Image: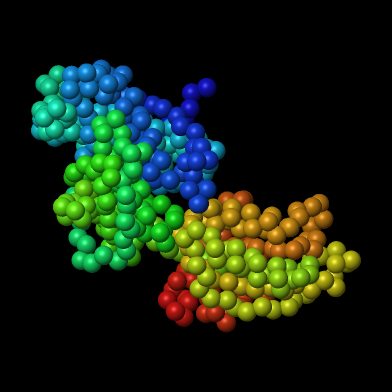
Amino acid sequence: MEKKTAGFIQSAHPFDETFAVRSYEAGVADRVTLPTLCNYMQEIAGLSADSLGWGIRKLQEEGLTWMLSRLHVKVSRYVPWGETVTMRTWPCGMKGRLIANRSFQAADSEGSLILEAHSEWLYVDMKAQRIARLPESFASLVPAGTPAVALEDLGGKSPSLPSVTSSVEVLVRRGDLDFNDHVNNVHYAEWMLEAVPERQDGPEEMDIVFHKAARAGDRLVSEAFCDGVRTCHRIRRPSDDSVLATAVMLWRAPKRVVVCLGSNIEPRMDYLDRAQAALSAMPSTRLLSSGGTDETDPVGVPDEFAAMKFLNRVLLFETCLSPQEFSRRMHAIEDDLGRVRGPVRNAPRTIDIDMIDYEGVVSDDPSLVLPHPRAASRPFVMEPMARMGLALGAAPALLHPDA
């Protein structure tokens, strides 16, 4: 069955490949990582070039090779482990006679676009170790009017680092080298991400430029300057103070989320505390405040459970996770704490975790309705929210006293 690829650009020489996200390609957020997506792009670029007679093995026989000099990628969704990514690439132009341009798009298993990227490649004489002019025959691959992915320049070629807010040292290993005998480009992106460990969600956009090569045994330093949702990066070799790679990354702005916890099975307080700790430990998430713990009578429960009172707690978090990812992790925490979803409605539960509001987002998706449809009728939700300075259906960032 042909896979849906709605939104893919049509060109003279498209090349498609589908990748399954393996467990070892998913990060702490249980989703495909940016370096993995970069590896997919490198792989499909090589396959496409080979299919057109410009593959790297053929070039190496002639003493030539391709080297990636710039990659600008924009990711709208990092798919979870187990899903598939269908990627398309095509040669899309030339910059003079020295740079070959290539574009990429990727879609998830439903055919929705999740990635667009544009890249620049150098045609290199391996023996002379210098850039070579592209043969005139290469132009036939990119006839006039060939479409390309267009992304606004983020300034990755020369980002400003007025200071270094974080850095990590790197020792280049033999395993970091590729068949050109220097560091594979994807490792530079990995090392840049290591310099911003507090961000585990993956950037929405990256513009990375490669200036010089590193080899096994080199000692490097990855430096970053963090300015809100924008981070500027450089990889430097202190031995000669040369800059090997630079980049600018844009990140999802953190959102504020209101969550309500409830438990009516002992030890109730312990279940609330454990749920709060687990939520606080989610990637790119931090607890901002609590509305306190209240004891309330159960609502709408069978008569035999009417005496089992709830302990409830309203919490305000800041997160870079999407509403769907936050909700998925909430339910996983419920399962870990022994929540049983049986046939009896409103039966006692070790823990109940409800997302009340996600910074004013309105959703009628049956799997995640926002704001919570019954929150306004629940005093154990509205009263703590009022104490915290929050209102239902409005952006918590605007109403929280610390905002």
Residue shown at 25% from the left, 41% from the top: 215
323 vs 215, left or right, is right
Residue 133 higher or lower than 24, as above or below: above
Residue shown at 31% from the left, 37% from the top: 177
Q: Nearer the viewer, residue 12 or 265?
A: 265
Residue 366 in percent (x, y) is at 62, 51
Residue 229 in percent (x, y) is at 34, 61
Residue 219 higher or lower than 104, as above or below: below
Residue 175 in percent (x, y) is at 36, 38
**Can see residue 228?**
yes
Q: Quadrant of the C terminus?
A: bottom left
Q: Nearer the viewer, residue 163 or 346?
A: 163
Count of numbered marks:
0
* Colouring scheme applied when the structure was drawn: rainbow
Q: Residue furthest right?
A: 304
49 vs 353, left or right, is left
Residue 342 higher or lower than 43, as above or below: below
Residue shown at 79% from the left, 52% from the top: 342
**Can see residue 9?**
no
Residue shown at 44% from the left, 73% from the top: 398
Asked where in the image residue 372 lies, by quadrant, the reply is bottom right
Residue 222 in percent (x, y) is at 29, 55
Q: Nearer the viewer, residue 119 or 387?
A: 119
